[in-house]
Image: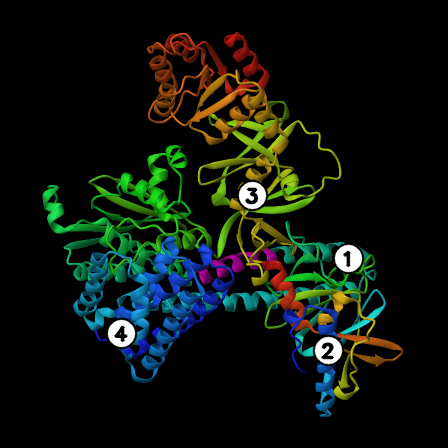
């Protein structure tokens, strides 16, 4: 999949044309390669991360609060002796906070930029999906989501939005340092 | 001693490519932000390292190029030259040229001559520099590598190499560890046995009612024994494993002594080096981190600390200088000292340099003690040696040394110096970073930890003894006012219910000379714990130094005390409204009384100042009796408030001295002290004080009323 460099994109038009370019690249690239996805929900909306970025899925374990940390950071957890942060994806994508955490899961995501836990409402399934069946993201996407969405698939009656964890983590890390 | 130079070359190439990368990155950032001092410092450090390493490997072509580039950066850093994109281009070209040289070194083991055009461009930039400096610099470049023989050329490298990823362990220690592991395994087997027993009890429960309880009881007793046994094993295993990582300081000291000889030879100085306490052991992690700072300190001592032979003779000293490297154990700390018997650090030279480089203003210097001024040598961009030399560079280093020791090693560094007798750098280091003494406290339902070395004292204070000065809480503690802050409030945690306690638990923490008192709900525990680092992307979260895990798997944040102190200071500063009204009063009331406050505690001074200013007085501060006397002579004050116990000149002496002058013979002088004894009071009155206020029963109204009464 071609890179979508958001740092250079400044207006919606730019974004759309870049998107267009991106979609074309997908069409040319007609390998029947399978993309593995971890499908999860946030406030009844379906999303997915490429599974290559997700190291493990943890059921809800107690999170310790860190003083002075940004609101999007729930705190830290202990995963076999290592401290991992837990990012609230709801807060990152502008959903309200989760009240019932009974089914909630923490995904451990790892990209070049960073490694962190990500809190999601539920994990639905882990599927392999043919690259060719991945469509361009819906045009109704809210602007704050545009840079981090790479496509969408149709799964059981649900539109699943595929998120770019590499980009998300990169932005998040830069946000923390800036 | 035969050293395989190839090994060093490979390392040099690797390290230099890293530094070139850093340089490249920094340079592109500089384009956007040409005034970023820290960025220029980083560029300087990167190129400085390349210069140093290449010199040791006799790669003179690289050294020449790096040195020239460093000269230019130094001018950029000092502000002599401003950054322009033309200059940036030359810097970039130079960097590329050095990168090319490094590639040569990688392929052939030697570097090509620097490109003449680029060197000329660098020279052109430097043209403003005095020619003498230029030649001196050049001379050093040529002399040093020739005098340093190849095997010793790797010395500094060795200092680092010795402490590489490999650990040598005595076989007996390893055997003990393995034996312990065996014990753990068999103890685990016993637990499996217990599991069978409890399943058995479960299966037959109720069939034989009389013995069920007895069986359970036996089971509980056995299990308890097992748990105790296991615990002992675990503790022993942990300590044995940690011991295996301990290394004697001689690992760093011995190469350091060779480095002293090497550096002194290349500088043409006669130096002996004495070593003490090399047998003291530190965690390998600490040893690793210690070698860089030691290299810097030693180079500094030989180059800047010790005088040239003639100078020593003229001062009536032995021609041969002496460097002493020593270590001693001090509780949970190790005290490492690098001492030279040279000329000492000249206060005047430090002041001048600091002013020249605009690192501090004259007023700031005035308010500092001699020791504080000497410690300014740790500021970035500082160097005392008037002549730039190739050996110890230009003061890149001491700031890095300080940061390494403070941040990476959780230690402290201090310098002291006596004119004519020499200087001593003291490093206080914890024995190990692996396990630290941690105090756990509770506040507003949450737990937090403090590392023990930042805790000055744990005290309980009756709520009625808490002072309220200028709307800020404070306590009196060891003859000074210490501001008291609620930890929950400082951390921004909301309290569910109002606390209404008779006794307040207080943790007094100290960073440098600043103390603050933190109110907590309960002191929970004090334990040796393993501190786990936060993930990399959270390192900007300066409030948390790391996490510890408690017995029931709970993670607790270890608070970073320097950040807390900063936050407290900022909170105190966040009172613009009050400040403004004061200024307003000052402006409208030119008749405002001008009061001199003399106290050696910064906190006390500040608190008294804010009380007085809140009541419309104009305030000047002095930090000891002598300072106070000097200021009193220069300005005419309407009243003087003074502490008793102070360095250099105490408050009684000050009072007496003031009374002997015409100017202060009859003006109000108030002594404010923690000395509550009648005898002291009498002494104060005999010295001529008009009032004597004990800090313990200090109330702001008391002070203001007294002052008003005296001023009439």
* Mark 3 lies on residue: B564
**Percent coordinates x, y for residue B593 in the rendering:** 50, 16
* Mark 1 lies on residue: B212
* Mark 2 lies on residue: A17
Tag 3–tag 2 contact (CB < 8 Å): no
Residue at left 79%, top 74%? A161
Q: Which span of residues is magenta-colored?
A: B226-242
- Of tags 1 and 3, the one toward the viewer is 3
Say whether residue B234 is magenta.
yes
Q: How far apart are marks 1 and 2 (CA)?
A: 78 Å
Quadrant location, the N terminus of chain B: bottom left
Tag 1–tag 4 contact (CB < 8 Å): no
* Mark 4 lies on residue: B61
**Name of the residue lying farthest toward the right:** A157
**Percent coordinates x, y for residue B166 in the rendering:** 39, 71
Q: Distance between the residues labelled 1 and 3?
A: 57 Å
Q: Identify the subunit bearing mark 3.
A: B
Q: Is residue B57 above or below residue B662?
A: below
Crowding at label 2, few (<14), some or many (≥20) Cα neighbours within 10 Å?
Answer: few
Crowding at label 1, few (<14), some or many (≥20) Cα neighbours within 10 Å?
Answer: some
Q: Is mark 4 on a helix, strand or loop?
A: helix
State whether the magenta stretch is mostly helix, strand or loop. helix
Q: Identify the subunit bearing mark 1.
A: B
Residue at left 42%, top 28%? B600
Q: Is mark 3 on a helix, strand or loop?
A: helix
Crowding at label 3, few (<14), some or many (≥20) Cα neighbours within 10 Å?
Answer: many
Q: Identify the subunit bearing mark 4.
A: B
Q: How far apart are marks 1 and 4 (CA)?
A: 87 Å
**Percent coordinates x, y for residue B344 in the rendering:** 24, 43
Q: Identify the subunit bearing mark 2.
A: A
- Location of residue A90 by image quarter: bottom right
């Amino acid at each position: 999949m071609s890179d979508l460099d958001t740092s250079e994109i400044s207006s919606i038009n730019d974004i759309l044309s870049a998107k267009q370019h991106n979609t074309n690249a997908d069409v040319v690239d007609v390998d029947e390669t399978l993309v593995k996805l971890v499908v999860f929900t946030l406030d009844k909306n379906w999303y997915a991360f490429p599974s290559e970025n997700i190291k493990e899925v943890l059921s809800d374990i107690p999170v310790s609060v860190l003083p002075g940390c940004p609101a999007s950071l729930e705190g830290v957890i202990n995963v076999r002796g290592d401290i991992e942060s837990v990012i609230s994806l709801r807060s990152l994508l502008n959903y309200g906070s989760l009240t019932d955490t009974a089914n909630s899961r923490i995904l451990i995501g790892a990209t070049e930029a960073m490694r962190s836990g990500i809190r999601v409402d539920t994990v639905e399934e882990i599927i392999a999906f043919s690259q060719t069946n991945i469509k361009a993201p819906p045009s109704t996407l809210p602007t704050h989501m545009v840079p981090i969405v790479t496509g969408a698939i149709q799964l059981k009656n649900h539109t699943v939005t595929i998120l770019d964890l590499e980009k998300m983590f990169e932005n998040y890390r830069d946000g923390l340092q800036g | 001693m035969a050293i395989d130079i190839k090994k060093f070359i490979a390392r040099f190439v690797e390290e230099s490519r890293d530094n070139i990368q850093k340089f490249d990155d920094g340079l592109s950032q500089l384009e956007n932000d040409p005034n970023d001092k820290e960025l220029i410092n980083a560029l300087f450090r990167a190129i400085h390292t390349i210069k140093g390493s290449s010199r040791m490997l006799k790669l003179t072509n690289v050294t020449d190029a790096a040195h020239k580039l460093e000269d230019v950066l130094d001018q950029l850093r000092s502000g002599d030259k401003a950054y322009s994109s033309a200059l940036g281009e030359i810097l970039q070209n130079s960097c590329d040229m050095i990168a090319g040289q490094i590639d040569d070194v990688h392929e052939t083991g030697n570097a090509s001559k620097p490109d003449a055009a680029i060197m000329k461009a660098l020279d052109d930039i430097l043209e403003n520099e005095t020619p003498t400096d230029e030649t001196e610099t050049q001379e050093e470049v040529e002399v040093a590598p020739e005098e340093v023989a190849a095997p010793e050329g790797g010395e500094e490298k060795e200092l680092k190499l010795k402490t590489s990823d490999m650990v040598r362990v005595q076989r007996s220690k390893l055997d003990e560890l393995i034996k312990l592991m065996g014990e753990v395994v068999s103890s685990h087997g016993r637990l499996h046995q217990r599991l069978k027993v409890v399943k058995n009890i479960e299966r037959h429960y109720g069939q034989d009612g009389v013995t069920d309880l007895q069986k359970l009881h036996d089971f509980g007793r056995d299990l308890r024994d097992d748990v105790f046994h296991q615990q002992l094993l675990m503790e022993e295993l942990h300590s044995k494993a940690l011991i295996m990582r301990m290394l004697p300081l001689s690992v760093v000291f011995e190469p350091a002594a060779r480095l002293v000889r090497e550096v002194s030879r290349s500088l043409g100085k006669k130096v002996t080096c004495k070593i003490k306490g090399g047998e003291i052991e530190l965690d390998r992690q600490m040893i690793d981190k210690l070698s860089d700072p030691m290299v810097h300190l030693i180079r500094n001592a030989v180059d800047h600390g010790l005088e040239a032979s003639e100078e020593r003779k003229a001062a009536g000293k032995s021609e041969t200088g002496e460097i002493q490297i020593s270590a001693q154990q001090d509780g949970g700390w190790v005290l490492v000292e690098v001492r030279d018997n040279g000329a000492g650090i000249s206060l005047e030279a430090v002041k001048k340099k600091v002013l020249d480089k605009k690192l501090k203003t004259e007023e700031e210097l005035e308010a500092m003690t001699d020791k504080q001024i000497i410690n300014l040598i740790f500021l970035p961009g500082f160097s005392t040696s008037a002549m730039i030399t190739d050996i110890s560079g230009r003061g890149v280093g001491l700031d890095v040394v300080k940061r390494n020791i403070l941040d990476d090693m959780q230690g402290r560094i201090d310098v002291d110096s006596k004119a004519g007798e020499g200087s001593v750098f003291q490093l206080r280091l914890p024995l190990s970073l692996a396990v630290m003494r941690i105090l756990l406290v509770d506040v507003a339902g949450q737990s937090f930890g403090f590392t023990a070395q930042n805790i000055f004292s744990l005290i309980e204070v009756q709520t009625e003894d808490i002072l309220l000065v200028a709307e800020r809480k404070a306590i009196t503690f060891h003859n000074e006012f210490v501001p008291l802050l609620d930890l929950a409030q400082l951390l921004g945690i909301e309290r569910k219910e109002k606390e209404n306690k008779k006794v307040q638990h207080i943790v007094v923490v100290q960073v440098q000379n600043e103390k603050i008192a933190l109110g907590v709900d309960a002191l929970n525990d004090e334990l040796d714990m393993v501190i786990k680092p936060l993930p990399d992307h959270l390192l900007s979260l300066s409030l948390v130094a790391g996490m510890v895990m408690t017995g029931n798997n709970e993670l607790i944040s270890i608070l970073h005390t320097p950040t807390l102190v900063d936050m407290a200071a900022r909170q105190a500063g966040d009172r613009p409204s009050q400040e403004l009204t004061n200024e307003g009063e000052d402006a409208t009331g030119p008749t405002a009384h001008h009061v001199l406050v003399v106290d050696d505690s910064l906190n006390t001074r500040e608190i008294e100042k804010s009380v007085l200013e809140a009541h419309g007085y104009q305030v000047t501060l002095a930090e000891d009796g002598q300072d106070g006397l000097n200021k009193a002579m220069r300005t005419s004050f309407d009243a003087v408030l003074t502490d008793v116990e102070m360095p250099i000149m105490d408050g009684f002496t000050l009072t007496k001295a003031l009374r002997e002058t015409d100017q202060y013979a009859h003006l109000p002088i108030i002594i404010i002290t923690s000395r509550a004894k009648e005898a002291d009071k009498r002494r104060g009155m005999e010295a001529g004080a008009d009032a004597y206020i004990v800090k313990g029963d200090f109330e702001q109204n008391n002070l203001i009323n007294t002052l008003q009464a005296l001023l009439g």
